[in-house]
Amino acid sequence: MPRIHLQEATRILHRGGLVAYPTEAVYGLGCLPRERRAVERLLDAKRRSWRKGLSLIAASLEQLEPLVEFPTGLLAEELLLSWPGPVTWVLNAKPGIPFWLTGGRDTLAVRVTGHALSRRLCETAASPLISTSANRSGRPPLRRALHVRREFGTSVDYVLKGKLGGEAKPTMIRDGRTGTVLRAS
């Protein structure tokens, strides 16, 4: 992947834009998490309620530390063993996290991605990114850049093309307080 594509995607993200990008299993749709207008555009494009909350991907634990409280003990070990990788954890959100990310809850869904291109995008943007599947609510997630462009048209400002990871289904989701699997992969 030429660096110029990552730089263009990052430029658009920092201008409040929406970017589609490959993840472990499907194309993701994202923006910078504190850009409220971008989040509103993303939710409109997906036809999704803010009450569902959103998940974030990051390149490292350090990118997530300002946002969530990490578990301790055995759950901390399980979390660390699962990252980087295709497991999303629902963790306690730190105070002041915007409601449009949490859906009005006291938790936030996060993961340190194992997908090389998504990880590089987070690194280049110097920020975690919202990561929701690129699809309209109720429709199957999209797996090709062309399909993303057809589905979303100009609602998405940039499609970062690349190969998906090897996962067949969207990531597993686990509760970071109990360890319960909320969605199997």
Image (tube, rainbow, N blue to C red):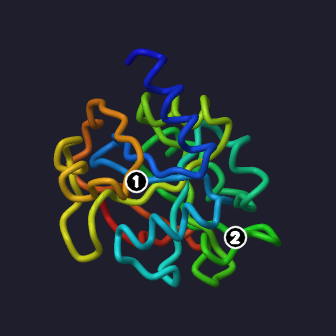
Task: Identify which residue, 160 or 165, lies in the foreground.
Answer: 160
Residue density around tag 1, few if under 14, some if 14–19, many if 20 or more, within 10 Å: many
| Residue 89 place in picture, x, y as percent | 54, 61
Looking at the image, residue 124 sits to the left or right of residue 136; the answer is: right
Q: Position of residue 74 (x, y in %)?
A: 64, 57
Q: What residue is disc 1 on?
A: 29
Name the residue type under label 2: Asn
Q: Residue at x 54, y 65 (%)?
A: 39
Q: Residue drawn at (34%, 40%), measured in percent from left and top?
A: 159
At 58% from the left and 73% from the top, the residue drawn is 178
Q: Which residue is mark 2?
A: 92
Q: Measured from the top left, where is residue 146 in percent x and y?
A: 18, 42
Relative depth, front residue between 169 and 37: 37
Residue beneath the point at 72% across and 61% down: 68
Q: Residues within 10 Å of mark 2 (few under 14, many from 20)?
A: many
> What separation in Å lies between label 2 and label 1 (alpha carbons)?
23 Å
Query: Helix, strand, or loop for circle 1?
Result: strand
